[in-house]
Image (tube, rainbow, N blue to C red):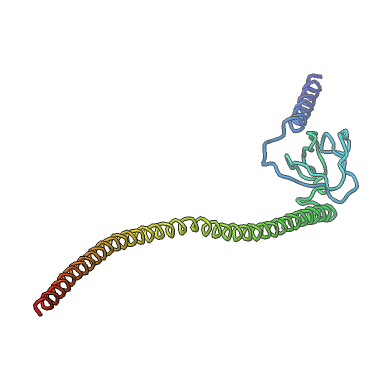
Amino acid sequence: MQKDDSVKRALLAGSVCAVALSLTLVVSPPAMAQSTAYISDELEVDVRRGQTLQHRILTFLSSGTRVTVLDEDGDYTLIRTSGGTEGWVQTRYLMDRPHAREQLSDARDRVQSLAAERDGLNDRLQALRDERDEESERAESLAALVADLEAELDNLREVAAEPLETARENEELRQSLSQEQQRVSDLLDENRALRGDERLNWFLYGGGVAIGSLILGILLTRVRLRRRQSGWID
């Protein structure tokens, strides 16, 4: 009887240890490096609480679903979904890369993204070309405007130089006029001097004529007196 009780206690202790070990494996799996895996080309894969088909199903994952690998134990792998659910799946349903359909879909998405990016770059390039053309036209317009302004500036300089040239010419004319006025004054003085000399000459001429006439008159008077005296004597 005591022997049977000992056997029962041993079996009970073994069962408790087994249950405790199972709970430990489920609740607190041993630490290992986490990695990424993908559900294979199966339609759906069940995620169970334990490593047997008798454990309760927690959720189903469709093919291509990305999961985080927490632990591996033989034919089963402990994973965590993106929603935070942790459970066991059969290892044969996992791949270390997305399957071909997912890769193709990703490639198509990438191609579409690159095509959209290319179109955006082409649009940007065209916009830059249009902007360059506008800037070129604007530069040409500015160059023409600068040329017009330079021509107008040259005209203004010429117009501004005309008063200066006129002032210079006026100054030269004033100087010439002053010189001519001085010459006229000198000529007038000389003319007045000449007139004075001419009057003096006329005066001298007149005086000489008068004196000559007086002398001639005296001589003629003497001649007449002599003739009369001669007649009386005869």
Q: Looking at the rendering, in which quadrant would you find the C terminus?
A: bottom left
Instruction: Indicate whether 47 appears above or below 131.
Output: above
Image quadrant in which you'd find residue 3: top right
Tell me where residue 53 appears, x and y as whole percent: 88, 39
Instruction: Indicate whether 107 appears above or below 49.
Output: below
Q: Which is nearer the eye, 132 or 183?
A: 183
Q: In the orientation shown, which residue stands out farthest toward the left?
A: 233
The answer to whether residue 71 is left or right of residue 157 is right
Q: Which is nearer the eye, 4 or 112?
A: 112
Residue found 30% across the figure and 63% down from its top: 191
Residue found 82% across the figure and 35% down from its top: 50
Image quadrant in which you'd find residue 33: top right
The answer to whether residue 206 is left or right of residue 133 is left
The answer to whether residue 90 is left or right of residue 216 is right
Tell me where residue 158 appears, x and y as whole percent: 52, 60
Q: Looking at the rendering, in which quadrant would you find the N terminus?
A: top right
Q: Which is nearer the eye, 109 or 153?
A: 153
Q: Which is nearer the eye, 3 or 89?
A: 89
Tell me where residue 104 appears, x and y as whole percent: 83, 56
Q: In the orientation shown, which residue stands out farthest toward the right?
A: 43
